[in-house]
Image (spheres, grey):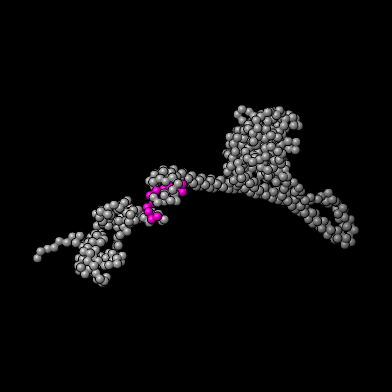
Amino acid sequence: MASTSWSEGDFSCSICLDVFSSPVTTPCGHNFCRTCITKFWDDKVKYKCPVCNKTFDMRPDLQVNTLLSELAAPFRKSVQVKEQPCVEPGEVPCDVCTGTQLKAVKSCLVCFISYCQTHLEPHQRVPRLKKHRLVEPMDCLEDRVCKKHDRLLELFCKTEQVSVCQFCTETDHKSHPIVPLKEEYEVKMAQLGKIEAEVQQMIQERQNNIQKIKDTVKRSKADADREIADGVQVLTTLMRCIEKCQDDLNRMVKKRLKSTEKQAEDLIKELEQEIKDLTNRSSEVKQLSHTKDHLHFLQTFRSLKIPQHTRDWTTVEVRPPSYVGTLRRSLDQLEETLNMEMKKLRDAELKRVQQYEVDVTLDPDTAQPRLILSKDGKQVYDGGVVKNLPDNPKRFTRFIYVLTRQSFSSVRFYFEVQVKDKSGWWLGVARESINRIGETMWTPETGYWILQYGKDGLVFRDNPSVCLPLSAELQKVGVFVDYDQGLVSFYDVEARVHLYSATGCTFSEPLYPILCPSRFNYEGINSAPLIISPVNQTD
């Protein structure tokens, strides 16, 4: 018996060109996939064979050809194995495959269908289909068709920034500049590179912000740990000092009490002994009073008259100890220790804020015309003569203020100003939008955080103003601002003393250091300059 060699082509459907799936046989003897012949006849009025064109009066009732199905099964399985892998995520599937969908290799812009290599064959063989425009596989082909004209969207309207078909350019977009999609694609692709760079920069900026926030939290934790450690150390020292003060007070009071008790005890013993002696003599007197022997009485009476050795108790007294001043002296020692610790704290606080030193210079464009600035922008004094200067919206016109060139927001900053040999001055910080022309109250409400020195002493300008104690003449003043915490603090740098803090401030715009040397000859010579000085942390 001769052997028969079957090939895949012997078991291929002439409609889908794939290995038979549920093959059926028409009355004319030709075989097709049941799904393929069913779909083919669904669109027809007359039923005919796709191969021989034989027509049938009625739609044939088709049954699966079991023998052919069994013979085709191994080939179908081998084809599925051979054509694996199937469509991967992101790839375009074949729109014709009825079983396992295979990867599309081309999309037809006429049929609006994507084909795998097998189902693409008619477009490579049939002359009419060869004219169809094939492109690389595209997904969602229906979105590439003009909904109004049912034509391919191949052009781009630059006016309305939309894709259009050829008919659109002759109607709704007739007067608009139109370019091919590829040309606009290249333009947008170039822009995309810029956008990508901007996006990456934004990502980097946000990553930097995250790192800054993390660094801030880390620094805040370190600051908190240091503050707690410093506080524990100081308070532990104070508690030990208080305990020692209490022990010393107790010991001193008890020592005085014990001395008094010892004196009283000794006197009581002496008195008791004298009472005992006197009691014995009283007994002798009573016995003698009953004797009838004249001679014995007279001889004994002579001995009774000899005076006993006793103290004159009228001058003896036990005085209670005096504790006046004992507690005060103990508290004086405690106060001395507390002052030493406070001095250490003030010194530590000043050194801490000095770490935020900024380099600032005075801005001549803001200086009132009477003011004279040094070339380096570090000194200012009142020249006494109003100079003729060009108009500048930044300039103070009435009051002799000057701002620095530098402004600050969302940061901590610190600067120092030498005020030595001056009988009057103003300094602090001010917000950018302050009134530089007319008169104002110079308070936080109007944008000024100012420390003033003059005939009224040292004053923080507020509503009402705050008068500050001053134990010695100021030489140099330090100004510290924590923008985020709403804090403005002033320090006596030489004495390492905190002068005043404005808390709970609301800052919504940049802050500028502001100086006013005050008018000269104000209660004496006041011509010395205000000098912005570098921080010397070794003071």
**Which SS does the magenta portion mostly show?**
loop
Residue 94 higher or lower than 54, as above or below: above
Question: With respect to residue 246, does 101 lie above or below?
Answer: below
Magenta span has 424?
no
The residue under the point 59% across, 40% down is: 408
Percent position (x, y) of residue 64? 24, 69
Please state which of residues 537 and 202 is positioned toward the viewer in this rendering: 202
Confirm whether residue 477 shows in the render: no
Q: Which residues are magenta?
A: 149-165
Give the residue drawn at x 87%, y 53%: 305
User: In the displayed structure, does residue 90 sit left or right of residue 25?
Assistant: right
Residue 476, position in %: x, y? 66, 34
> Residue drawn at (58%, 39%), measured in percent from left and top?
356
User: What x and y, as percent, mark residue 37?
Assistant: 27, 65
Q: Quadrant of the N terminus?
A: bottom left
How many numbered marks, from 0 up?
0
Relative to 93, is 433 above or below?
above
Residue 17 seen in the current view: yes
Q: Residue drawn 67% across and 47% down? A: 245
